[in-house]
Amino acid sequence: MAENRASAYGEGVPCWVDAQLPDVAAGKRFYGDLFGWTFPEATEGPGGGAEGPGGAEGVPGAEGAPGAGRAGRAGRAGGAGSAGAAGASAGFGSPGGPVVARLGGEPVASLAPKKDGRMPTVWTVYFATPDAEALADRVWAAGGQVVTAPLPVADLGVTALVADPEGAVFGLWQPNRHPGFGRRHEPGTFAWAELYARDTETANDFYGGLFHDALFGPGAEPDFGRASVGEAFAAEMPPHFVVHFRVEECEAAVRTVVRLGGRVQVPPFETSYGKVAVVIDNQGASFAVLQR
């Protein structure tokens, strides 16, 4: 049963994920087999296109790789975001365009085609906000960067890409008609976002100030954490977010990833929030599977 989304996503709560892929059709086969996702031809989005923050070509996700370039003040003024603005509605319903993944009929993620082969193949996490413009200003004021200025995605909402002081990229989503996940925290859906940072104290200060209520407010149940890069990755790995999807059994999910042409980046290991393995799909996008 889908959760009540009306009050699910306060500011700072992860509310959507998308992947930028070279081949969306191949992504549908991979993730459909791994997580049981379906990709109905007809969707609620305009023209049958994608419904989520990443459902527009050139908008979020394209620069969302570990260590991606940061546009800074230029992006805030529209320099980095201007190309995306032109494509914000062009992707809807276009052949080979973005698609929404569903589980039990509810939206859980989106897959979008890379329009430029130089862009990274990557999963991006989006945090909810009632005002993307104001939150982007706060990111800048706290020492972060604005990669893509806030842009409307048809009547679905407003999106932006930003980066923290160490360069880890994440998205912002101000909902209108699309509130975010229809399902989460269950097998085959988003379960956790982990930031791997070099300077954890800087990360604590930045995100603690930016998303204080979601992390520490009354009744907060965060599904966002942080760790040192060296805890799971080589020390030279740039700071970045890893999107976690819940699975029934971690080792079995890893075997399925390998069978489908993916590979293991970090073998299963224990964390405070469950057993995790970091894997890479058959096109190069990194994500994690999590057994609670």
Image (cartoon, rainbow, N blue to C red):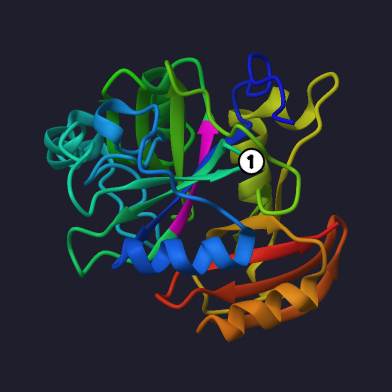
Q: In which quarter of the image is residue 106?
A: top right
Does 35 appear above or below 259?
above
Q: Quadrant of residue 220?
A: top right
Query: Residue sitting at 30 percent across and 51 percent down?
Result: 70
Q: Where is residue 54 in the image (x, y as percent from the top left)?
A: 36, 42
Q: In this view, does 143 lie to the left or right of 200?
A: left
Q: Quadrant of the C terminus?
A: bottom right
Q: Is residue 264 visible?
A: no
The residue type indicated by label 1 comes to: Gly
Query: Residue sitting at 21 percent across and 33 percent down?
Result: 88
Q: In this view, does 276 lie to the left or right of 119?
A: right
Query: Residue sitting at 26 percent across and 40 percent down?
Result: 56
Q: Is residue 203 left or right of residue 84?
A: right
Does 178 appear above or below 292?
above
Span shown in magenta: 123-127
Q: Quadrant of the N terminus?
A: top right
Query: Residue sitting at 65 percent across and 40 percent down?
Result: 205
Mark 1 residue element: loop
Which of the pair 52/99 is nearer the observer? 99
Q: In this view, does 118 lie to the left or right of 261?
A: left
Which of the pair 92/13 is nearer the observer? 92
Q: Which residue is disc 1 drawn over?
A: 104
Does 75 appear above or below 276?
above
